[in-house]
Amino acid sequence: MKNCEYRQIEPQGLGTPNAAPPPPAGANDADTRAKRRRKWEVFPGKNRFYCDGRIMVARQSGVLPLTLGLIVLTSCLFFVFDCPFLVEHVTSCIPAIGGALFAFVIISLLQTSFRDPGILPRATADEAAYTEKQIDDSASSSYRPPPRTLEVIINQQVVKLKYCFTCKMFRPPRTSHCSLCDNCVERFDHHCPWVGNCVGKRNYRFFYAFIVSLSFLTAFIFGCVTTHLTLRTFPLTPSCTALELIVCFFSVWSILGLSGFHTYLVASNLTTNEDIKGSWSGNSGVQNTVNPYSYNNIFANCCAVLCAPLPPSLIDRRGFLPTQESPPAAQPQVELPVFVGKSDLTVV
């Protein structure tokens, strides 16, 4: 047995017979982006997403095609059977007016249906634990559910914030949890099945524009159809024109009534949810309550609801999910032999 001398081998001098050349810098980035998932793919609410998350609608949106179908069908019948006669006998401006109203209605409807209504992101596990820790002021380590309400003062008016056990947070003022979409929506007005979406802070102005413009379109078509039937010289009435008259007659009253109701809400700076519950009218059991969000001026309330800057979406549905930090892409790792001390290495 004798000691064996050895010399330290530098890592750069090692050869790797089957080592593949390092991939291009752009290949790893492309593969990483392909494997990463967007947030809309794991969105916890009951929504449907299209066009890579750019369009979102409620899961129960079966009435939206019916709404679009009724508007398009009635308008097409009007342009085909009534406009030619009215252009010849009344004025040539009728198709232009009808077309402008129709385009405005469709654009407002799509903006209401496909836009984020103001969904609040759910609290993370750390945020939920922090909230429960702040609420639980006892020394007991056992779990205690947080209280359901928290009182805040807005314009010298006490407002109760309810705790959402689904989203794990106290809902901000005027926020409510929609049971159909399973989301907390800021300034929640109502869930409208006709537009296939919740109506909240980020799409209420488009919803209001939709119902008001639809009222004008329905009244315009109803008046034109009535004029057409009045001016006809022969007794035969096209069945399509009669169908238009029936649809517009039964639609105009309900749509006008809905427009008037929401005009009252806009002028008072109220939501449908607050009006039904009677939050500021004393019907909720609390006396001497006033609306703390009203400016006590119709013009100011209308500007605040319809003309205020549109807040950005908070859910970042097209963002990427966070991934674990990967080691930097440097030179390929080479497994080196383990060397021991000189006095411990022996050979036979």
Image (tube, rainbow, N blue to C red):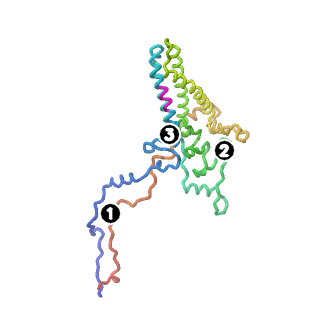
Q: Residues within 10 Å of mark 2 (few under 14, many from 20)?
A: some
User: How far is mark 3 from mark 1, CA to CA?
Assistant: 47 Å
Amino acid type, label 1 = Pro
Q: Residues within 10 Å of mark 1 (few under 14, many from 20)?
A: few
Q: Residues within 10 Å of mark 3 (few under 14, many from 20)?
A: some
What residue does disc 3 label?
115
Q: Is residue 256 above or below residue 195?
A: above
User: How far is mark 3 from mark 2, CA to CA?
Assistant: 29 Å
Which quadrant, please, contains the C terminus? bottom left
Amino acid type, label 3 = Arg
Numbered mark located on residue 332 in the image: 1
Give the SS element for disc 2.
Answer: strand
The magenta span reads: 68-75
Overall secondary structure of the magenta stretch?
helix
User: How far is mark 1 from mark 2, CA to CA?
Assistant: 61 Å
Query: Is residue 316 shown left or right of residue 252?
Result: left
Which quadrant, please, contains the N terminus? bottom left
What residue does disc 2 label?
159
| Image spot of residue 146 (x, y percent) | 64, 54
| Image spot of residue 93 (x, y percent) | 46, 18
